[in-house]
Amino acid sequence: MKHYTDKTHIKIIIISAVIIIFTFVCIIGYIDVNKRFPKAGGEFYSEEQWVDYDYMQIRAKKMEYLTKEEYGERYENSGIADRSDKLSYFVLTLELHNLTDEDINLNKNFIGNVSLEAYPQGYNNQGNFIDENGKADTRSILEANQTKEFTIVFNVNESVVGKSRINKLKKSDIYFSMSCYPVHKAIVFNGVD
């Protein structure tokens, strides 16, 4: 049987008390954080459904996956065919309706707040508006009380996604997310062609 001195007993008691207090503080902090920031709820919509988004309504018309060659054929004046990178594209066509009496600059007030996400493959990207020639549209204005069709392109870089995973990516659930917290609001596509 081993005998301890009083100093050893005091050290053991102090170390035990510090461990118990630290564990208690961690548990209280974990519970407090989860009360302040509960899990986000979800509002998920399908294609052709109108979605209220702040000062406008949005409807997804179609989502397509295009290789670089297909994109170059559809948008001949885009200059994409001359690029050497290994890109493919998700092309999303939206119909937007302005509910206000003021013009909305979509590049300033919309495109930075939305993203395209694919689960379970883990793709996430922000897009750009393009014009009918496939070039970046820097003057995307939705006039007061106007309904207009816009196209957003999202790059898919094969060196990031991996050429072998492209088919799995196209079959994934693809979310056009308009907000993530406190409510995850998104239009869901169950795979694309």
Image (cartoon, rainbow, N blue to C red):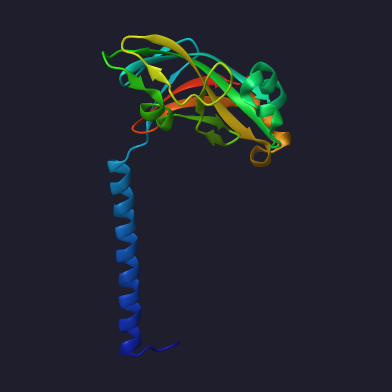
Residue drawn at (39%, 19%), measured in percent from left and top?
A: 141
Residue drawn at (35%, 79%), measured in percent from left and top?
A: 12
In-image side of 66 versus 35 (left or right): right
| Quarter of the image where the C terminus is located | top right
Q: Nearer the viewer, residue 27 or 9?
A: 27
Choose top left, top right, bottom left or bottom right for residue 170: top right
Q: Residue furthest left?
A: 101
In-image side of 72 versus 38 (left or right): right
Q: Nearer the viewer, residue 181 or 154?
A: 154
Residue 167 shows in this picture: no
In-image side of 49 versus 101 (left or right): right
| Quarter of the image where the N terminus is located | bottom left
Residue 188 shows in this picture: yes
In-image side of 137 versus 73 (left or right): left
* Residue 20 percent across, percent down from the top left: 32, 65
* Residue 85 percent across, percent down from the top left: 69, 37
Q: Nearer the viewer, residue 75 or 181?
A: 75
